[in-house]
Image: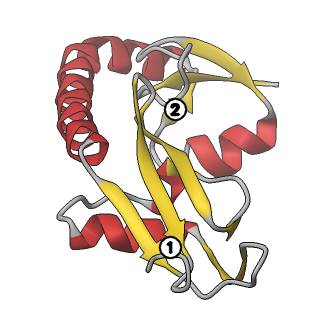
Amino acid sequence: MTKVVVLEKFKKNWEIGSVVSVKDGYARNYLVPIGKAKFATKKNIEEIKSLEKNLLKKDDENKLNANNTALKINGLKFTKEIAAKENGELYGSLSVSDIVTYLSENEVNIQKKFVKLGNKIKTTGEYSVDIDLHPEVNCSLNIEILSPKTSV
C-alpha cells in the first residue's frame, strides 16, 4: 500500500489534503499522473497544506458549477424513438454516448464518465439515469424510449 495526499475531492470520503492509503498501482498509474493526488512525502504534505485554501476554493467553484448543471439536467426529459419489436425489445439500444450527445444538444456539456447507465437500454419504456457531476452533487435524467408504432 502507498500513502498519498489527496488534491481534490473525488470520492465521498476523501477530503482535500487528507492522507490515504491506496494500492501501489492505483497511486502510480492513476491518481498521481492525472493530478488527483501526490505521494505522501513530508515536502508534498507541507506544500499541499499551504495550497489547501486555494484547492478548497477551486472545489467550491466546481461544486457550484455542478449544481447549476444539475438544475439544467433535472429540467430535461430525453424522448427518443427507436425501432422495436412487438414485445418492446429494441433493434438498437440507447447508450451513454446517446445521452451525452442529447445533453450537449441542450447546452449541457458533461463527460461520459459522469453518466451511470450500467447496461445499455434495450427495451421501450421510461427510465431514470443517474449522473454524478461532483462527489457531492448528483442528478438524474428522465428518459422515455418509444417505438415508432407506439408513439401514434
Q: Relative to the observer, which residue lies in front, 144 or 135?
A: 144
Type of the residue with mark 1: Ser
Q: Is residue 151 left or right of residue 117?
A: left
Q: Residue at x 62, y 53 (%)?
A: 117
Q: Secondary structure at mark 2?
A: strand
Q: Is residue 66 left or right of residue 140?
A: left
Q: Residue at x 25, y 18 (%)?
A: 56
Location of mark 1 (residue)? 97
Q: Residue at x 28, y 15 (%)?
A: 52
Please say if 120 is above or below 35: below
Residue 72 locus on image (x, y percent)? 20, 45
Residue 128 locus on image (x, y percent)? 52, 45
Q: CA distance from mark 2 to mark 1?
A: 32 Å
Residue 66 locus on image (x, y percent)? 26, 37
Please say if 62 is above or below 122: above
Location of mark 2 (residue)? 38
Quadrant that contains the N terminus? top right
Q: Nearer the viewer, mark 2 or mark 1?
A: 1
